[in-house]
Image (cartoon, rainbow, N blue to C red):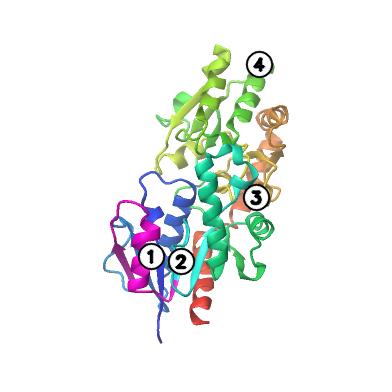
Amino acid sequence: MKKTVIGIDASRSNTAQRTGTEYYSYEIIKQMISLKRESVELRLYSKTPLDYVDKNQKGVSNRVMSFPKLWSQIRLSFEILRNPPDVLFVPAHTIPVFHGKKTVITLHDVGFKYYPELYTPLERIYHDWCMRFSVKHANQIIAISEATKKDLIKLYGADERKITVVYHGYDKKKYFVKKEPDHPKIKPLGKYIYFIGRLEAKKNITTLIKAFALLKQNRSINHKLVLAGRPGYQYEQISDLIASLDDFIKKDIIELGYVSDEDAPLFMRNADIFAFPSNFEGFGMPLVEAMASGVPVVASNTTSIPEILNGAGLLHSVHDHKQLSDMLLQLIGDKKSHDKYVKLGLLRSSVFKWDDAASKTLDVIERLGSS
């Protein structure tokens, strides 16, 4: 039986500090490899060697192609022209100009259309071009949520028949229930409300900080607010707000900076509450990681977030910091409510599996390859 040769743009999977689409790219490719389907050959294209690829595994190869700029559009395009795969899969970027006859792409979100002010002008132009080009030229599209699918149809006229919704999974070896209050990295924090993600305007962190400040002003609580993630676009809005707060509030807001893949699960599972007030999410990976860690979730009632939680967390109006503060207080002060959302979250998280995601994605690619 002839194998389907699948070329994969693995360039985004190999970054040192993975977030969002980079993490998705890493996990989906890694799981595709681990499935060991005998009907496919995986040809992974990257700028640097992929450390998660076993050189001895049959049916998997890593083609390392260094190039200074416009790697996808120039270097990858040239490789596809020179030695085309049966199907090209792009998990976390845009389709190259020369992409072969059959292409599958994962499209993550269109946040730049809803909140243009949260992106630079150049980012808006680039993202819009990438989305239009990808929707037009992809034979099949993987959407990471029903919310993203609806946006692609509404805003870009995508053909519903060529879109398949495939949810992310989570790493079960890292995200599980285990409290470690005496761990040296956890003990100094005490009880805390946790956020992880890039510290930028589109994550709506100022609403969380205002909610936390209101909580500290009106109630005698000992919780800290722990923010994990590197600064992003318009970070100064966050830093300026923190600087303006009273000292007794400011001292309880801890910025961890970028948290490694090893430490991220530790900080997540030891949190008392996970808060995710984001303006826009195509999926919202930390929501699943929090639920799987037995941490109750409070999140904004927007885009894909209600879909992913599906009743397993509390939802606040996106910019209503008072409502968010009230919900945080509910989970802090009401043990029954806290325990209820822990149980609901654990049940909901069981739906999300990387091996399922990889298998469904490969099914889409193989069907296209054989058509």
Residue annotated with mark 4: 217
Q: Are marks 1 and 4 in contact (CB under 8 Å)?
A: no
- Magenta-highlighted residues: 60-87
Residue annotated with mark 2: 89
Q: How far, Cα to Cα, is label 3 from label 1?
A: 33 Å
Q: Are marks 3 and 1 in contact (CB under 8 Å)?
A: no
Dot 2: element: strand
Residue at 63 percent of width and 55 percent of height: 148
How many residues crowd mark 1 within 10 Å: few (<14), some (14–19), many (20+)? some
Amino acid of disc 3: Ser
Dot 1: element: helix
Q: How far, Cα to Cα, is label 2 from label 4?
A: 51 Å
Residue annotated with mark 1: 77
Give the quarter of the image for residue 204.
top right
Residue at 47 percent of width and 27 percent of height: 255
Q: Is 371 in front, or is 310?
A: 371
How many residues crowd mark 2 within 10 Å: few (<14), some (14–19), many (20+)? many
Residue that sits furthest to the top in the current view: 247
Mark toward the start of the polypeptide (3 vs 1): 1
| Image position, residue 282 (x, y; %) | 59, 50
Q: Is 227 in front, or is 267?
A: 227
Residue at 57 percent of width and 47 percent of height: 284
